[in-house]
Amino acid sequence: MENVTLLGATGSVGIQTVDVIRQHRHRFSLFAIAFGNNVEKALPIIQEFQPKFVVVSSKESKQDLELRLTVKPKILVGQAGMEEVSTHPDVDIVVNAVLGSIGLVPTLSAIRARKKIAFANKETLVTAGHLVNKEAEKYGVELLPIDSEHAAIHQCLKGESLKEVNRIIITASGGSFRDKTREELQHVTLEQALKHPNWSMGAKITIDSATMMNKGLEVIEAHWLFKLPYEQLDVVLHKESVIHSMVEFNDLSVMAQLGTPDMRGPIQYALSYPHRLELQNAKRLDLVEIGKLHFEKMNFERFPCLKMAYDAGRAGGSMPTVLNAANEEAVQLFLNGQISFLKIEDFIQKALDEHTIINDPDLTTIVEVDQQTRKQVKSYLSF
Ligand code: NDP
Ligand code: MG
């Protein structure tokens, strides 16, 4: 039996992780969960799995939980709580499915405690991939990707040497506005942006998919996970999301991983790696029914966020931290109805332009740059 700490249990990835654990109760036990303040979503999970620890982000949510729970887990608050449940000696696997760079410190702690880490939280790798990799190498910890593209690449690379890889080809669905022109994007609404054609995900990543920043973040995520330079990381538009990504080797042979768009596949593979388990209530991929797959070259002018991400990734240092923090903040402003869709990329570009790069930033610098960028992006509202 493996004990699992699940950070971000009430989110889209979190709820699907709970489903995977439910399907394999003989194999995994939900030891601890962490979430923000969504007590309504957390209550049934706590009642069903009776984790030993629950971490919330505010004292109010702690009080609310205490009043309403019939079972009595130990309830902790905030980042210190997330660190405690990520390093507890009884924990075998930490699933990091929180949203945003808030996942960085618990990740570093889990690495130092030599936990197996299943990783969905791409913002953490974008903001400080060099720190995460340095610690992972030092402590001999492998990060097991949950993001579907990276899980696909991880599967294609199984048993292969990175030295024999020519390039990685990450597929992009194109998000909710794939077929719209730049002009048409001026008038799109939040409601339209939240309708992803293939995947059902949390609000922030759905907007990131529409701006194509999600693919940009994934390129940087791939750079750190697979330790390849940006020249060897390509993106291709593939609207069906059937091929989750590909690897081209030096003999020009290409390996691809295919599947239906169901995050429980990659979540389960990260949990059971290097083995595979059955996945119940899932749809089998039917290529005959699908009939055709389409591929298109990526257009950086149509999707400037992807270019910003490549540029920030190549620049390195504190630039990806600015990219990530500006994006998190701008997307939040869009979700709040405070800015229009195209303002998201304007705000990110402005934050990048105004930043003077700091090379090899340490954790304190990363946190400072992150906070400073968020403040700055909010200040653009008054222009
Ligand atoms: P959601 O918004 O659905 O969920 C986010 C989770 O993080 C919630 O449990 C939320 O709690 C929690 N959280 C937010 N802020 C805090 C905080 N301050 N302290 C503790 N917990 C917090 O996001 P997704 O599940 O969509 O995405 C999670 C991560 O996985 C992201 O990095 C995303 O890019 C990545 N990912 C997601 C995919 C998907 O299919 N959804 C696919 C691939 C990657 P609360 O509910 O209380 O706010
Ligand atoms: Mg993805």
Image (spheres, grey):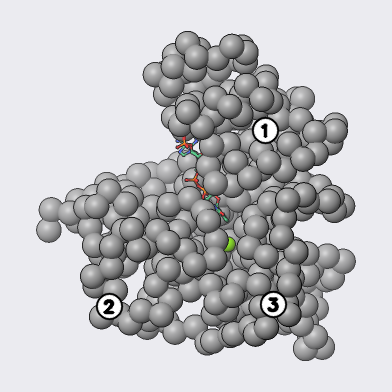
> Is the residue marked by circle 2 packed among few (<14), some (14-19), or many (20+) residues within 10 Å?
few
In the picture shown, does residue 243 fall above or below 141?
Answer: below
Nearer mark to the viewer, of 2 and 1: 2
Q: Amino acid at mark 1?
A: Thr
Q: Residue at x 43, y 43 (%)?
A: 367
Give me the disc on residue 184: 2
In the rendered image, which residue does mark 3 sit on? 289
**Is 365 placed left or right of 155 in the picture?**
left
User: What is the spatial separation of the Cα atoms under label 3 and label 2, in whole angstroms?
Assistant: 32 Å
Mark 3 vs mark 2: which is more N-terminal? 2
- Residue type (three-letter) at the residue carrying disc 3: Glu
Q: Within 10 angstroms of label 1, few (less than 14), some, or many (20 or more) residues?
A: many
Name the one closer to the observer, 155 or 133.
155
Where, quadrant-wise, is the C terminus in this rendering?
bottom left
Find numbered disc 1 in the image and state the secondary structure of the residue it sits on: strand
Residue 221 image-quadrant placement: bottom right
Cβ of mark 1 under 8 A from ligand 1: no
Q: Position of residue 118 (x, y in %)?
A: 69, 47
State the residue at coordinates (58%, 36%). 9
User: Which mark is drawn over residue 5?
Assistant: 1
Q: Measure the C-alpha gap from mark 3 to mark 1.
A: 39 Å
Callout 3 secondary element: helix
Image location (x, y in percent) of residue 337: 24, 52
Please name the residue shown 13% across and 53% down the image: 382
Q: Are marks 3 and 2 in contact (CB under 8 Å)?
A: no
62 lies left or right of 274: left
Asked if 43 appears above or below 365 in the picture, the reply is above
Q: Is residue 348 visible?
A: no
Q: In the image, is residue 170 above or below residue 277?
A: below
Report helix, strand or loop for mark 2: helix
Where does residue 378 sit, x and y in percent of width and height?
24, 50
Residue type at numbered disc 2: Glu
